Image: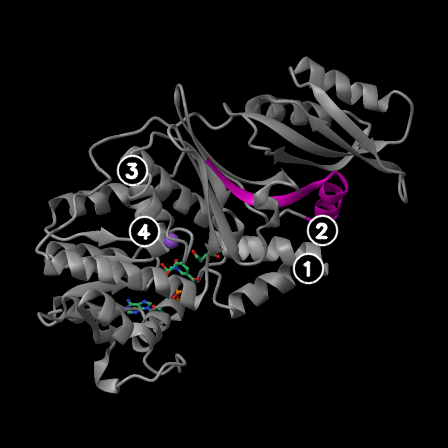
Amino acid sequence: MRMKTVRVGILGFGTVGAGVVEGLRRNGARIAERTGLNLEVGGIADLDLETDRGVEVDRALLTADAASLVDDPGIDVVAELIGGEGAARELTLRALKAGKPVVTANKALLAEHGKEIFDAVERAEAGLYFEAAVGGGIPILRALCGGLVGERVERMYGILNGTCNYILSRMESDRLSFEHVLAEAQRAGYAEAEPGLDVDGFDTAHKAVILAALAYGAPLPMDGIRVRGIRGIASGEIEYAAELGYRIKLLAIVRQRENGIELRVEPALVPRQHPLASVGGVFNAVAVEGDLTGETMYYGRGAGRYPTASAVIGDLVQAAGDRAAGAAPRPRISSSRSLDLLPAGDAPLRCYLRLALIDRPGVLAKVAEVLGAHGISIASVLQKERREGEYAPVIVLTHKARESRYEAAVEAIRSLEVVGEDIVRLAIEDFDD
Ligand SMILES: NC(=O)C1=CN([C@@H]2O[C@H](COP(=O)(O)OP(=O)(O)OC[C@H]3O[C@@H](n4cnc5c(N)ncnc54)[C@H](O)[C@@H]3O)[C@@H](O)[C@H]2O)C=CC1
Ligand SMILES: N[C@@H](CC=O)C(=O)O
Ligand code: NA
């Protein structure tokens, strides 16, 4: 096999960038043997050149000037591993304009600036590759654009954030506090530089927007998407859910409905026997339902240095191969198309409501009356013994109703004088329709 050398410019020598350099060192010879492509690190740019990244590199490869690395005629392919929407955006657009393929792990950039980025891709003579941006090391985007390309995608759902899944799993199994486990996830290199993106659900939403863009051919705007995170999930909720036979998971749900695409991110109760309930720790899982094959499911590590590096390396091979063949792949996402988003609140949902009620005859009937008046039907009720104070915890599980009805009903319940503390409302997802 004739060997072709492709020189890669690494922008960002952090968790993922260092993982890519190490991964290429470990497996470069194997990749060359399999593909005929010799992927050589041609330069590494980072603003911080002093921190030990745990990977030995020739210091001559290092620069603090990422733009000059992008412009270097010796660099064939650029890997944008800086993150964020500032320098990463400028450098990605710069590389595409110069006709250099870009591999990126940056879901925030793709979801928040999708129109601009995919517009640049349509005009560029080079491709944009972003397998690492969704599901870490799971080749979910390849599945969607490859094996499943003949499907009409009806629904995609799953766990897309390793940090949140790690937090919820450890809170349940080891009864640790949210803050303690978040710090662990940060030390492990799972969390975003701004961990609010993880715990408030936006990272999951970014990934869901990318999945939807690939399935339906156009970027969806982030505003208008219902996004809830896990910050407010107390260990008590996890315990009540477990008693009722559920686990709480941060889910992304994308669904093609008659009058638009439903896209929401929220912590939800998943039945313990559903495969998603046993996805623990940093693992992610995504189910795709197509009209031909029905449901397929993808599982693996969703964050961390090496799983993410693996996805980046896979894309580098793809980008280098396309370049060596003189082909820029046809963009699958068109910036000129637009998709209709189902208004937040329109999706039909089952819910878990936890209330604190004064322990007195007729109180539960008042709550049931308010729910009934809002068209919400009760599936079951669990009242716990009052331990201290004047309120008893009561958990109501409902049948399906539009989300906007719950919002109105919760407001009305809150104003009853027999209700104390905050009312917790979580979706119940059993994926059986
Ligand atoms: N850590 C993970 O598990 C995963 C991360 N990602 C994505 O990968 C990207 C990188 O993430 P991490 O490696 O975790 O972040 P990180 O914070 O560990 O690394 C980013 C590096 O970029 C450098 N940098 C910042 N501004 C720069 C500039 N203007 N020029 C050159 N270097 C600059 C920083 O000094 C830092 O070393 C982000 O887009 C993130 O969302 C995607 C999947 C998983
Ligand atoms: N912070 C993200 C990293 C991968 O995308 C996560 O925890 O999933
Ligand atoms: Na992936």
Q: State which mark lies toward you, 3 or 4.
A: 3
Question: Which span is picked out in magenta?
Answer: 234-253
Q: Answer yes or no: do the residues labelled 4 and 1 have beta carbons within 8 Å?
A: no
What's the mark number on residue 149? 3
Q: Which quadrant is home to the N terminus? A: bottom left
SS for callout 2: helix
Tag shown at residue 177: 1
- The quarter of the displayed image where residue 246 is located: top right
Real-space CA distance between mark 3 and mark 4, rounded to the nearest whole angstrom: 24 Å
Q: Residue at x 29, y 58 (%)?
A: 104
Residue drawn at point x = 53 percent, y = 70 percent: 187
Is residue 66 toward the left or the right of residue 291 in the image?
A: left
Q: Position of residue 358 (x, y in %)?
A: 86, 31
Q: Are marks 3 and 2 in contact (CB under 8 Å)?
A: no
The residue labelled by disc 4 is 109
Q: Marks 4/1: CA distance? A: 31 Å
**If the picture is divided into quarters, which one holds ligand 2?**
bottom left
Foreground: 399 or 327? 327
Secondary element at tag 3: loop
Q: Amino acid at mark 1?
A: Ser
**Dots 3, 4 in contact, CB < 8 A:** no
Identify the image quadrant of residue 46.
Answer: bottom left
Of pointers 4 and 1, the one earlier in the residue sequence: 4
Ligand 1 under 8 Å from disc 4 Cβ:
yes
Asked if residue 11 lies left or right of residue 156, the reply is left
Residue position for label 2: 235
